Amino acid sequence: MSAVVAGRWSAGQGGVRAALLALAPFLGLLALALVLPLVGNDYWALIGTRAAIYWVLVSGLNLIVGFAGQLAIGYVALLTLGAYTTSVLAAGKLGAPVPVLAALAAAGVVGALSGVIVGLPALRLRTFYFAMSTLGFATIVTQIALAWQSVTGGGIGLAGPELSAPFNTAWGYYFVCVGLAAICTWLSANIAASRFGLALIAIRDAEVAAEAAGISKPRALVAIFLFAGALAAIAGGLFATLQTYITPDAFTFDLSVLFFIAILIGGRGSVLGPLLGTIILTVLPEIAAPLAAWSTFLYAVLLLVIVLAAPGGIAALLDFRNRRPLASNRSIVPRPAALRALMGEGTKGEMLSLRDIALHFGNVRAIDGIDLDVLPAQVHGLIGPNGSGKTTTLNVISGYYAPSSGSLSIGAAALPAGRPHLRARRGIARTFQTPRIIGEASVLQNVMIGGVIAGEESFVEAMLTLPRHRRSQRRLAALAREALAVVGLESLAEVRADRLQHSELRFIEIARALMLRPSFLLLDEPAAGLSHDELERLGTLITAISRLGTGVLLVEHHADLIFDICDRVTVLDLGRVLATGTPQEIRSHKEVVSAYLGG
Amino acid sequence: MFASILATGLAAGAIYALVGIVYNTMFSASRVMSFTSGQLAMLGGVFGSLFMLRLGMPTVLAFVLTLLGCGLVGVVTEMVAVRPVLKSLDKHLYVLSTLALALMIQQVTAIEWSTEPQPFPRIVGWGSGNWDEKFWLPVAACAATIVGLEYLHRRTLVGHAFLAIAEDNFAARALGLPERNLRVASYALAGIVGGIAGFSGGELLLAFVANGPFLNFYGFVPVALGGLGNNRGAIVGGLALGLFQQAANFLVGGIFSSVAVFALFIVVLLAAPQGLFGAATARRV
């Protein structure tokens, strides 16, 4: 017991050190920004201010592009919108003139709403559609700015809002923008580190697993569309003040490209990388003046090179920790004894039942009238030849397919057909035939994904790291470490998941599923690719999970494992139930033996 | 007014439809939607103006050279931006690689050609008013392209091979079809169609670098409405979009026509994510 406590304590110490290490580059950049006035002239103030304003926009956009993986390529539109909203309101072109701060706030609101409208296609459609809708939005905002002459001044433009003393000097304004940039860094880093940030990277790299963990893509995306839209429009207002006079020409598509590429150069899923990317891309054309005309071309070349050669960007170059070699003779030793601490007391008593479930794809009857009962505290094996409908049955239970007919229920309550992200809340967790893992995230983060929906704190609480968020975050991490301890992988918690072996990924998926403390656990061929010893340990682990009250539905081809640990076995053939019974009954069932087991 | 809505609407719609066919041709061969689609049509106009006005070539020669040039850009798209990412596990990389190439094309055009709209010469010299050639030429070019593609797909062996690749890439390869060469050929074909769109629409849209991103969006809308890979949908969608846009233009003014098009795009996509004539989704789990 004391060893566990000591272990956790030292993990806490390491956490503080790691946090300081992670913070150091940001503090260093801030120090550089504060030193700049001592060494630079007004020209540098201009460039520094511009970089800070761009970062205000990019810090929000980074959550969309770098974390959620949604390719928003036309974000200059929101900059334009913010610049015009602020300028028009401050100049009194629509009603009475408004103070600059109020105009900026109004721009933030307009930007947040527009961010959601532009993002709507991303909620339902493939990436390219979202890219297109942001591009289309960028085209029409410029057209409107040109055509709506009475308000925007058309091609002639209008004056940007002016700040009062002492912020109306070059350096005064510089400090305003750097201050705001620092705040935005803090906010976006908070979101990135919170359960909302985890949900975003899960949507990006393992959307199916995210749904199974109960993460709602629309909800997660709308929150960051609001956030990023507001920041982009506020950046636009600041940009208008910096320019002192704005015309539609000031908002070329090149700016969009700069924002977008700064993030990709920086690296996905990082805050520091895109910050460095923004600074580099803003400063570079200034240093190499002859290149200025060709800057967009160079950005595009850079983009192509990164896509083809170095998809990890700057962040991957700076990731020294994951260069250390891992021990090569690792073995997975699960500790079922730690389960009780993780799962609590098993109090579940209801039964998961499928009645006459059928699913047809055209004329193909993938499953054709299946009855199945998964009892609590039992391991139920589902076996059958390839194509007999085992995985399809799991997919119907977890909501990826809506059955053509039949009913699904837990106890007396029906399960809605085809709503995968609602399954986690009903206590159903699962693993996948091919592990659905976020390769770029750490093992610990991957496991934490499973507990994202258990958090109580709101998006705003997470953004401001209020106490409830910090408590919930600590609880989530602690729970994930416990789950990792159960499957025996706690020593790999901080390692990037894509460095692990296939068998280890299978156990990570089990740990992630256990985070839900599920009433029902669906395992899709968990033993594929495991060594003989690992297979045995997996069997012990599955039995231990079921003894705490969880009903386990196990799809597997290893007949030994099935007959060793299952309480009941159902055999499928050609989409129908061939037999159901205890392992002994199945082993001696004539048709099963001839159709599947052989012998 | 009705007649001019019809004339400008059908003309613009025919150009959008052709760009939609460019998207579809590339998509059918590789499952890739490319940002170079609109740029190819932009290049069609720029090449035409370059060859005829700046270099003083005869119309027919300029037309052929334009198509060759655009076909070449299509092949370059395949080699630089599509082939390297097709094998990658991250299926979205093509969005970035084709975007990068599109930006390069646009930037080179802006610097080496002009950032301002440049004139495009009259080609045939028939018609005036609503029957001016700048209105009927794109429609005629669109019709000719459809007939040509129909002939290609129905009557020629290469056309059948294109259809086979579009239907089932793996099966086509298993049959021994030279998938890579067919893909290159498809991209060349897409380039040529883009060239036709830009050349025939040159008098209407001028030789203007900003047509690239503009047509990228307005050419994609009919594809999204009509369903990916569905040329019939793209043509119906393109013409409808042109008419809708011009009607909005005449009735409520230029500001709101673009807003209306954008709103239409978003609303239809949310209501029918696969497009109005599209097929069902792919398997996910």
Image: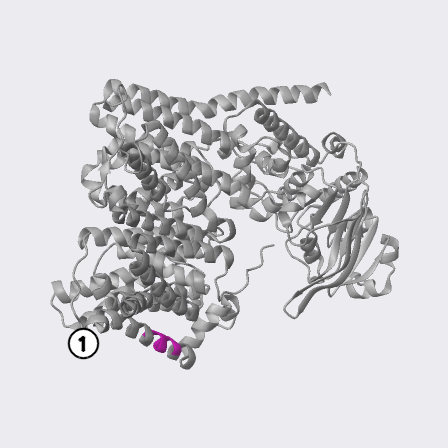
Residue A336: % across, % down: 75, 35
Mark 1 Cα shell of 10 Å, populated few (<14), some (14-19), many (≥20): few
| Residues in magenta, as a range | B145-150
Q: In which quarter of the view is residue A360 placed?
A: bottom right
Residue B24: % across, % down: 41, 65
Q: Nearer the viewer, residue A131 or B190?
A: A131
Tag 1's secondary structure?
A: loop
Chain letter for the residue marked with disc 1 in the picture: B
Identified at 64% across, 30% down, the residue is: A481
Q: In which quarter of the view is residue A369 placed?
A: bottom right
Please give left or right for residue A197 compared with residue B82 in the image: right
Residue A31: % across, % down: 35, 20
Note whether B47 is above or below A410 in the view shown: below
Identified at 66% across, 19% down, the residue is: A6
Quadrant for the N terminus of chain A, please: top right
Note whether B206 is above or below A144 in the view shown: below
What amino acid is at disc 1?
Trp
Residue B146 located within the stretch drawn in magenta: yes
Task: Identify residue for label 1.
Answer: B126
